[in-house]
Every structure is written in C-alpha cells, then in structure tokens.
Amino acid sequence: MWVKLCCLLLYFLALFVLARVFEAVAWYESGFLATQLVDPVALSFRKLRTILECRGLGHSGLPEKKDVRALVEKSGDLMEGELYSALKEEEASESVSSTNFSGEMHFYELVEDTKDGIWLVQVIANDRSPLVGKVHWQKMVKKVSRFGIRTGTFNCSSDPRYCKRRGWLKSTLIMSVPQTSTSKGKVMLKEYSGRKIEVEHIFKWITAHAASRIKTIYNSEHLKEEWNKSDQYRVKIYLFANLDQPPAFFSALSVKFTGRVEFIFVNVENWDNKSYMAEIGIYKTPSYILRTPEGIYRYGNNTGEFISLRAMDSFLRSLQPEVNDLFVLSLVLVNLMAWMDLFITQGATIKRFVVLISTLGTYNSLLIISWLPVLGFLQLPYLDSFYEYSLKLFRYSNTTTLASWVRADWMFYSSHPALFLSTYLGHGLLIDYFEKKRRRNNNTDEVNANNLEWLSSLWDWYTSYLFHPIASFQHFPFDSDWDEDPDLFLERLAFPDLWLHPLIPTDYIKNLPMWRFQCLGAHSDEEMLETFPDSESDSESENKEVFSSDREVSEDDELSTCHRCSEGERRCGAEACSCATHYCHHEPCGCKGSCYSSAGDLEPDWSTWPNDMLHCTECVVCLENFAKGCLLMGLPCGHVFHQSCIVMWLAGGRHCCPVCRWVSYKKKQPYTHPQPLSSEPPS
C-alpha cells in the first residue's frame, strides 16, 4: 500500500512539473502567461461577446463594440487564461443532454426535491405545440448549462392528471429555485409570463430570479452595517461592481453554495461617497472580496482565479467543502492508487488483472467502511469546535499560492482528460519497467511467467487447499489417502463447506523457537582431523550393527523398553540417550539421527535446547546431521529441524510438521518422558 501511495504522489508531482512546462512553452510561443491581463480594446467584437456569455451578462441591447467592451470591464478583469477557456468552450460543439420526465414522481424526485440547483422545464400541454421551438430550445439548453442550470421537458400526455392539478393547461416554461437561504430548504416554481419567446429574453428572466436571492447593498451605510454584522455565515463573498444586477455565474453559485457561503452584491453605480470602501481596503471596482474570520482575500490575484463559474466554484469548494466533496476526492485518490497495482504486479497478464480486481474491491470496501464511523462521528453535537477548526485549516491552506497552482492544474487536466489518462498510463509503464528490472536483478521467476503457467500454479495452490484440509479442523494427525481410496473424495464432495479454507498467514514462523546446535567437550580442529581417520572404520561398523539391530526391534519395544547402557556401548542420538543416568529412553520423535560413540564423537549439549523439544541429531527434511553451530528451529509438536529447511517447508504452504503432521501454528501438550521401569518385583 505504501509503495502505491508513493507512486501516486510521484505521479502528482510529475503532473505539477508538466503543467509548469506547458506554461513555459506557451509563454515562449505566444509571449504571455495565463495570469496576464488582457486589454479589452484589443479584442474583437466576437471575443468580447463570448466573454460576456461565459460570465452570464446580457448584451442583446448593445450593438456597438465600445458598449460591449465597457460591460466586460465593469464585470471584472480579463486574463489570458479566461479568454483561452472561453474560446475553447465556444468551439467545442458538444450536445448537452436534457431530461424527459416520465410523470409526477420523476418530476418531483429531480426538480422539487432538489434543494441546491436551478431547473428550467418546458411543459408541453396536451394537443399543444411547445412554447419554445426545437432549435431555440437547444440553444437555450446550451446557454444555461454553462451556469449549472439543468433543463428538462415534461409532456402532459404522459401524466395529464398532474398537469391539471398544477394548472398547466397551456405550454409554458417552469423554473425551480430554492426559496430560502438555508441548505435543503423549500423549492418554489416560477412560470414564465413574458410575451417574447426569445433566448435572450428568457435568459434575462432566469438571471433576474436567480439574482433576487442575493443580498444587494445600494449605499455605504448599509454596507457598513452588513460588514460589521456577525451572523451564522462564517464565509461571505462580496462583489463590488457598477452593474444593474450580478452576473449569472455569481447568482448560480449563490444557489449551489446555499447554507455554506453568503453572496452579497454591492451596487456602487450611484455612490457619491466611497470613503468607507477605502476604509475596508476596497480601492477599485469591480472587486471580488472574500471575507472570512481569518481576514480578507481578494479573488483574482493568484493563478487560475478567473471570473467564471468553474474557477470560482473550485475555489469555494476548497475553502468550504461538503462531506460529499471529501468523499468523492478520497474515492478518486483510492482508485488511482489501486490501479497502480496493474503496473507494480509482475508476471502474467491474467495475474495482473486478477490482482487489480482484488485490490479495487478491497480498497473501495475499506474506504466505505471507514467513512461510516466518520459520518456518525460528525453528527455528534459536541464536535462543532472540531468542525470549525477543520474549516479554518482548509481556509488557511487553500488561500496560498501553492493551492492556487493546484486548483489551476486541476481545472487544466480535468478539461483535458485524454492528457490526464495518457500521463497516468506513461507513469504506470515507467513503474512497470523499473519494477521488472528490479525483480530480474533479484532473479525472481515470476517476471517471465506466462498466463498458462500462472493459471496452472493458481490451480495447484487451490487444489492443495481443496484436498488437504487445515490441521486446525482435525483433532488427530491426518494422512491423505485420496489415491488409495477414491470414496473419500466422493464423501468430501457431500460437504461443500469443508472445501473453503482461509489462507494461513506465515507471521507465526518468526515466533517459533530457534537456537544453535552445541556440543559438550569440544575438541580443536587439529584433534578432530587426527582422530577422524582412526575412528572412521569403527563408526562404519558400529552403524552397520545399529541398523541391523534396529531392524530386529519391533515398534512396540521401541516405545516401551528401557535398557542399561555400559561405559563402552554406543549411544544413539535419535533415541535420546541420556549419559548422565546411563539410561537410554526411546522416544517416538521420528528423527533418524546418526549414532556416535562416547570415545570418538562429541556429546550434544542438551541443556541449550528448549525443554519441550525432542532430542535428535538429524533433520528429516534434508536428511543431514546437525553440525556444530548450525541454526535449529522447533515446532509446537517438539520436533526439531534445520531453520532454513523448515522455513522453506512452511512457507510453501505446508503448515504442518513433516514428521507427525501436527499443525505448525497450534500449541501441543509438552511430551513427558516415560519413567524407567523399576527392577524390584512388586510386593
């Protein structure tokens, strides 16, 4: 997870650097930056009209260029970035969809139950033609959709009873606007009563009703009273301008941020005394001023702060976000991080997509589960101060220059999704290249595995858990007899719940006891080399005698018989001979150790062994004797092996003892040594 998070942060850093490169290239080719101001005098009439349409100001009664230019100057400063975005938006001939309502419930769900948006609905009465023709309606839809106004058509033939109850006996236009200034308030429906059925007149009617929700100030006394008033709104945005009504984008944002931000329009058209404006730091108009408890912020001075709906919407969302905004942001980041698994995972293509689907499901499930307590936590009434401090932190951080760059980059890449996806793919391919190179240097075999090999290994892994149950379900050592008795397989099919077994983590391996094999009475290397040739023949003859004698002793005798050992007799490490008491206790450990004599070989130092470990001198995994100083590891059942051998055995998915099949992660009662038989006859 941390690797994917680092890769995602590296990708965002690459996007930030790439945006700065694009700015440098644009400045080199054209000689201007996106934040550079544009003189409206140098623009053509078509470009000026495009700017007014994007800002939402009517220009139908302004036939001359100087009047249009004056209206642009009154609405706010024009930057190169805003001009570029407006021209690109006009060139893009994308068709905007409009909703067709199927009946009363559909209309109520989308229009009357929507508390934070504006709807424009064309009602077509029974056996009547629509009020606005098809061509003009498409122009109307495209014009109002720039400001977040949704459109739809309600045909009364689909629900005539609802139209009669509403009084829609003729074709008309209906506009829905939130009635109150509180979040999730009531919605009022207004009917168009104008005589002129033209796009510009209908748009003026819409903007007039939307602007009526904004508090308007006409004199300095009212401004002074409002500026010093403290109410429920912690964030207020003021527009100081010489206009009849605020632009449409400003009115649309006031509806969108209902209950979060208060929008105030200060009309300075007929002001003679502007001394109080100078006192509060307003020296020029138009000005967009954001007033927060932390201070005053002038919108438009930093990168990407254009006089448009999209730019101001992203700015206000970063200052006063909703919980839904944070959830959507976290959802996007989590999925971008999960998709990194497609490039980090090496091997077959099918393996990559299987891991990707698993990661997407896991990450999204964890995200939703983690958000549930957060939502309940935010509903507590005792967390108002915590909520206010969080918003204060957002306001401090998002009014910096770095935050303005991030918002500008977000708007740029969101308007060019193909560039965003291509850079993400290129970044992923680079990660795939370096990860593949790193694993090849580590000699990892999974890099060159194809789809068939990976599917085969997946099937082997699945069948290993399918046919060999986990020992925690068994109360005795289990040996598989599938090949000998196929009826067991058919019997297993009758109980499908036993087929599903969870994966066993290998964390318990590091908690298993480990120690080094030590010997008593250790000799120097020179002495060992001198005595080795003389004792070689003796040890071989003794081994032959031991093996022949072991064949003659039955299994029951090994578990129950105790015999006395003399001074010169052989001692068997596999049977745990105790030389301190001169008795040999045969233990069912299953270890086939090498035999040694007291005169030639070294005596193992059993005091260094854990108390619950069985004594043996050979590893049954590799079938080699324990050498002096080698690292040993014991299992809960008491059997001892080479540490490297048993770790490879357990890591391969065989979570049981190679000797007795006891599970390697479950404790077992310690083995008690049998007491020697008494030589005295019973009384």
Image (tube, helix red, strand yellow):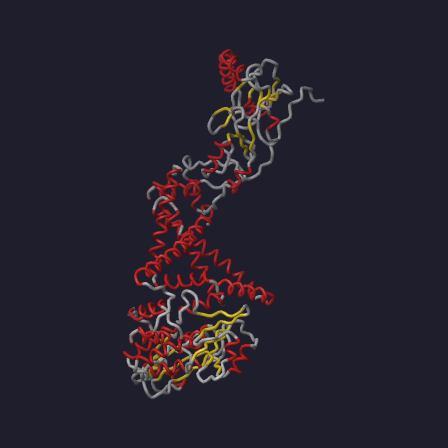
Work out whether residue 459 or residue 403 is closer to the camera in this orientation and state it. Answer: 403
Vertical placement of 250 versus 583: above or below? below
Q: Quadrant of residue 443?
A: top left
Res. 283 visible in picture? yes
Q: Position of residue 321 (x, y in %)?
A: 48, 66
Q: Is residue 527 left or right of residue 126?
A: right
Q: Position of residue 337 (x, y in %)?
A: 42, 53
Res. 101 visible in picture? no
* Residue at point 62%, 28% (across, down): 673
Vertical placement of 573 versus 656: above or below? above
Q: Quadrant of the C terminus?
A: top right
Vertical placement of 308 versus 555: above or below? below
Q: Is residue 370 left or right of residue 29?
A: right
Vertical placement of 523 versus 83: above or below? above
Work out whether residue 547 or residue 316 is closer to the camera in this orientation and state it. Answer: 316
For the image, the number of numbered tags is 0
Seen as rendered, the residue at the extreme right is 683
Seen as rendered, the residue at the extreme bottom is 195
* Residue at point 56%, 30% (across, down): 515
Q: Position of residue 529 (x, y in %)?
A: 51, 15
Q: Position of residue 40 (x, y in %)?
A: 34, 74
Q: Quadrant of residue 112?
A: bottom left
Work out whether residue 432 or residue 620 is closer to the camera in this orientation and state it. Answer: 432
Seen as rendered, the residue at the extreme left is 135
Work out whether residue 235 or residue 647 is closer to the camera in this orientation and state it. Answer: 235
